[in-house]
Image: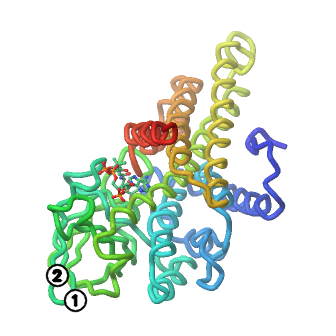
């Protein structure tokens, strides 16, 4: 039993095996690459087929579409283990599973599932999600990327921003506005390959953290989509986006726990070695106070996250719970990564140690897939509704 396991309830044999497999893969294959991925903004292509074979690229996809058919609890544990080794790798997997695969699984036709899921689930293809735009993020319905009808076809014009996996992706779940006068009820969702005429990709963003996770904008210039690309019903795309993000927030929460764990793990290792005033700094009360707060928060974030994932697995409403998990875990990641740097002192501020990477990686978890401000809004509005 290690402090890193930290979940008192029995996860069951299968989930525990998944956790062990993910931890062993993360420790042996991902962690040795983590510094290179961060320092060189290196995309770890070689990990993708291996993660495909292990079932990580199609974690919750049914076996009939070549997925691993795992629970969302197991999926969160995979993302957490990957993030404890390398936050970039974890979000490549999480955006792919949560943001691209899930909406196809939940809203796609049988034909769409057969077309897209097997290649995505095995890691042969990579997925992304096009919702945000240069001028709209939190107010997701205020999009200017438009779709006009030409007979049965849909012509897409506009730009999507902050596309995680964008530079490498083969498949995109896209949202575009058909009728602006209807607000969120005028939005359509599509799934399409990215090698279509009229689609171009912006230059990869030069980011503060998660430097090996490639991000770019996607430009659509008169791209002709057909009914076969429509995901869900026409004009019901906002529901697709929101439902997808509910699940995505579990993935980001799990990623944040992994980052927080890595910050604590590295701080503990450093603190046992570093001598000040004649003894290892972990024996000083001020450092112990930091460690106590860090490990308590990591455990609390995991309980919230696995609790929300369990609700999803058992078919219960989990929207507020996913937002609470994402909010708390992402603030925990920043809290722990910040103290991790503090515990390292000057060494925490230079790139010779991973402490500063954890702090840079942690920050994004408070921003993407819904900022902390949006999570608070979702939590409070659901709470009020639940108490009517
Ligand atoms: N789950 C399911 N349905 C939801 C929902 C949710 N969490 N939130 C809203 N809805 C539904 C409502 O029930 C309502 O449905 P009806 O039309 O049937 O009544 C509809 O959506 C509209 O609801 P609202 O009036 O509340 O919508 P709104 O426009 O005021 O916005 C919001 C609500 C919560 C602020 C929403 O816009 C939001 O979540 N914003 C954040 C967007 C976000 O997370 N963006 C991240 C993009 S992905 C990314 O980060 C890039 C990447 O690659 C990682």
Residue 205 is situated, as x and y percent measured from the top left of the image, at: 30, 55
Instruction: Kindly identify which residue carries mark 2.
Output: 149
346 over 196 or under it: above or below:
above
Q: For the point 50% across and 72% down, which residue is it?
A: 106
Count of numbered marks: 2
The answer to whether residue 358 is seen in the rendering is no
What secondary structure is marked by label 2? Answer: strand
Residue 53 is situated, as x and y percent measured from the top left of the image, at: 65, 76
Instruction: Kindly identify which residue carries mark 1.
Output: 152
Q: Are marks 1 and 2 in contact (CB under 8 Å)?
A: yes
Q: For the point 64% across and 53% down, which residue is it?
A: 311
Q: For the point 79% across and 64% down, which residue is it?
A: 14
The answer to whether residue 234 is seen in the rendering is yes
Q: For the point 39% across and 39% down, which residue is it?
A: 377
Circle 2 Cα neighbour tier, 10 Å, few/some/many (<14 / 14–19 / ≥20): few
Relative placement, left or right, of 175 versus 281 is left
260 over 15 or under it: above or below:
above
Q: Residue furthest top?
A: 277
């Amino acid at each position: 039993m290690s402090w890193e396991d930290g979940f008192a309830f029995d996860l069951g044999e299968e989930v525990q095996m998944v956790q062990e497999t993910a931890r062993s893969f993360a420790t042996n294959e991902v962690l040795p690459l983590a510094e290179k991925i961060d320092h060189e903004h290196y995309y770890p292509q070689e990990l993708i087929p291996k993660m495909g074979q292990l079932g990580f690229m199609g974690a919750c996809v049914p076996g009939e579409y070549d997925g691993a058919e795992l629970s969302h609890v197991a999926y969160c544990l995979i993302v957490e283990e990957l993030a404890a080794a390398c936050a970039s790798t974890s979000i490549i997997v999480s955006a792919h599973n949560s943001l691209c695969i899930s909406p196809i699984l939940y809203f796609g036709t049988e034909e769409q599932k057969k077309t897209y899921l097997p290649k995505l689930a095995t890691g042969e293809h990579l997925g992304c999600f096009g919702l945000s735009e240069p001028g709209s993020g939190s107010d997701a319905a205020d999009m200017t990327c438009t779709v006009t009808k030409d007979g049965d076809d849909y012509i897409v014009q506009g730009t999507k921003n902050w596309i995680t996996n964008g530079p490498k992706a083969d498949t995109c779940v896209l949202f575009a506005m058909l009728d602006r006068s209807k607000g969120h009820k005028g939005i359509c969702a599509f799934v399409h390959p990215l090698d279509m005429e009229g689609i171009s990709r912006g230059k990869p963003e030069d980011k503060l953290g998660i430097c090996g996770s490639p991000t770019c904008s996607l430009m659509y210039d008169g791209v002709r989509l057909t009914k076969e690309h429509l995901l869900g019903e026409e004009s019901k795309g906002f529901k697709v986006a929101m439902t997808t993000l509910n699940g995505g927030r579990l993935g980001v929460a799990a990623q944040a726990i992994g980052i927080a764990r890595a910050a604590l793990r590295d701080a503990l290792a450093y603190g046992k070695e570093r001598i000040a005033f004649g003894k290892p700094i972990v024996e000083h009360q001020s450092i112990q106070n930091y460690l106590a707060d860090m490990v308590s928060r990591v455990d609390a974030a995991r309980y919230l996250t696995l609790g929300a994932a369990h609700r999803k697995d058992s078919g219960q409403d989990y929207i507020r719970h996913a937002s609470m998990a994402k909010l708390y875990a992402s603030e925990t990641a920043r809290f722990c990564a910040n103290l991790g740097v503090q515990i390292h002192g000057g060494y925490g501020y230079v790139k010779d140690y991973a402490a500063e990477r954890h702090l840079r990686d942690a920050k994004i978890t408070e921003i993407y897939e819904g900022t902390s401000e949006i999570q608070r809004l979702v939590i409070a509005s659901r709470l009020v509704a639940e108490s009517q």
